[in-house]
Image (cartoon, coloured by chain):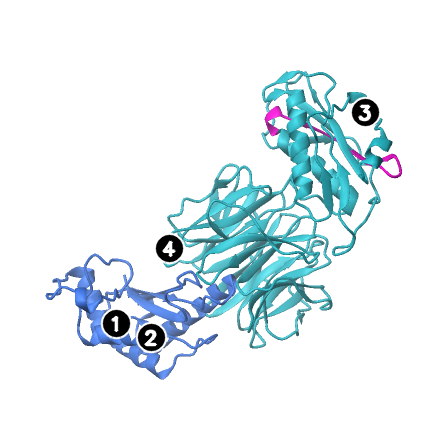
Amino acid sequence: MRSSLLLLAAMGLAVPAASQRRLPVIIPLGRSSPQPPQLTGIDALRADFLARSGGDTVFFGANSAILGPPAQLKLQAQALWLRQHAEVLVRIEGHADPGDTRDHALAVGARRAEEVRNYLVLLGVPAAQLTTMSWGKERPGLPRAVTVLVR
Amino acid sequence: MTLPPRLILSFGLTLLAVPARAQEPGTAAAAVVAVPPLSTPSDKQTSAGGTLSLAWQASQLIAQDLRTTSEIMPLPPKQKDYYSYPEVTAPTFSRWRSAGAKMLVTGFVQARSDERVTFGCYVYDVDKGREVARKGFVVAPEEWSRAAHKCSGLAYTAVTGAPGIFDTRIAYVAEGGASSARVKRIAIMDSDGTNHSYLTAGETMVLTPRLSPKAARLAYVSFAGGKPQVQLLDVASGAQRLLVANDAISFAPRFSPDGTRIVFSMMLGANSDIYIAGFDGPIPQRLTTSPGIDTDPSVSPDGSKIVFESDRSGSQQLYVMSADGSNQRRLTFGGGWYAAPEWSPDGEWIAFTRRGSDGRRIGIIKPDGTGEKLLTAGPGDEGPSWAASSRELIFQRSDAAGSTGIYRLSLDGSEPRNVAIPQGGSDPDWSGLMD
């Protein structure tokens, strides 16, 4: 998952316009169209954010809300982009492990989202650009992760 | 007559003070209880059929209720066993002794001039040849099943000493769709699976429905506002509102046993603490302040204490505090992680989910920290909720493929039993006895 995200971003692949909600969508390479579609508006912003920051998702260790060096690198790139796009709002969504219990998972996801938010603020992103929420363990496809979504 | 449809008027004293045969969980074989057909003084038409027909249906339902327990083995009614009206109050005990019955449940259904019906319910100790409990219920004819459930409860209490669980409701999260894109809806049903309905439409994520003690209200977590927040719902009218009118993440609601207050947790930054709020009252009061995740509060039946989980020690453990937040002390030291505690209605036990190397399992521990027992083998069990009897739990079990179901578990150590629901289900919650 992590390496796919990086690969996708490094190749500058754009994201299909139909994908409004959840980014990035990983396109199987063999089936992707040779010409990426032209993107405008928020979709273009999202694609640019992904391409410049190396992905929207950072990962955590089990039961941890501590940002490791790979996550910090990605967030530094995100912070740079967000400071250049002060008009863009992002939602920071935290996720917990499916093995966690329901309510503790909600708090763990929120704690991770808060950690990402605090780091972005530390790097100079205005807090008004950022909102946080938690999915707990309700999105099992993204365990122990935080996604920063342009909205 | 304009009575609320689900209101039951009960009359007559419950004569029973001391249970005829108090059984401890895990001991004694099931008591055989005879359930002959209920009688009627005269077969009168009602809006739900003749009283003789109602009596027959009620007898079958009583036997069916008692069969779901591990403490009682019912001798079900037989159509050919005519049971006369005088026999209701003057049973032929020798007949039931020879059938092997220890107890006898009988009664009558009588039409009233106000178009309702009276259910008389009698419980006898067959060995001693005497009445041990009696109760009457006046209901609309369409509500006959609730009167039957009440009668089953009277028999259950006579045998076990514990409250009957038949006139209770269960709320849970109905789960449809693929595991990657679950559609979740709050569902509610009677404890025997009837009267099933959905309370939310499925367009937003919902979690952890928690019923008020008499099942009139429901607190749950909704993502409708873009983040998890506690919503309050009136079950009959469907009216909803946010518990706390702010922008914070709130979750893990539970009603106090008297139904007047709600304990829950709310995030402030990366910190989750326990709060208590009146149902209609002023702003919530904060009860914990430790850094870390304090959540899943549950109030003791006398209202004096709250059990909750906290990771302040570095791992999730159970803690008990006074209801004002003072005297916080750790309860669990057994190794592994402990979560989602719920205090039993009789105050004797605290049920929990334990996370360990063998997955998630359901267990119980006494409020003084002794007597810890794991009741399920796991590995995907979670979120126990007590029956009103304090002798059974309902919980969620997930399999490796991610599909979830609801199970009932008796404290006597028998295997959990699957609860039949239309789809997958999670986060079950069992109400107390209804009025």
Checking the image for residue A120, the label placed there is: 2
Q: Colour of chain B?
A: cyan
Per the image, the residue denoted by label 1 is A82
Q: Residue drawn at (53%, 69%), measured in percent from left and top? A: B293
Q: Quadrant of residue B396?
A: bottom right
Disc on res. B307: none
Q: Which of the 4 image quadrants contains residue B98?
A: top right
Q: What's under tag 1, amino acid-wise?
A: Leu
In the shown orientation, is residue B59 left or right of residue B22? left
Q: Which amino acid type is shown beneath numbered disc 2?
A: Leu
CA gap between label 3 and label 1 equals 84 Å
Q: Which residue is mark 3?
A: B87
Q: Is residue B269 visible?
A: no
In this view, the residue in front, A151 or B13, is: B13
Q: Which structural element holds mark 2?
A: helix
Distance, label 2 to label 4, CA atoms, is: 34 Å
Depth check, front residue: A85 or B315: B315
Q: Quadrant of the N terminus of chain A?
A: bottom left
Q: Secondary structure at mark 1?
A: helix
Is label 3 in contact with label 2 (beta carbons under 8 Å)? no
Q: Amino acid at mark 3?
A: Glu
Q: Is residue A114 left or right of residue B87?
A: left
Quick one: label 3 or label 4, which is nearer the N terminus?
Answer: 3
Based on the displayed image, in which of its 4 quarters is residue B298 positioned?
Answer: bottom right
Marks 3/4 same chain: yes
Name the residue located 74 percent from the left edge and 55 percent from the top edge: B25
Q: Say yes or no: labels 1 and 4 on the same chain.
A: no
Marks 3 and 1: CB-CB under 8 Å? no
Range shown magenta: B123-143
Tell me whether marks 3 and 1 sit on the same chain. no
Measured from the top left, where is residue B26 in percent x and y?
74, 56
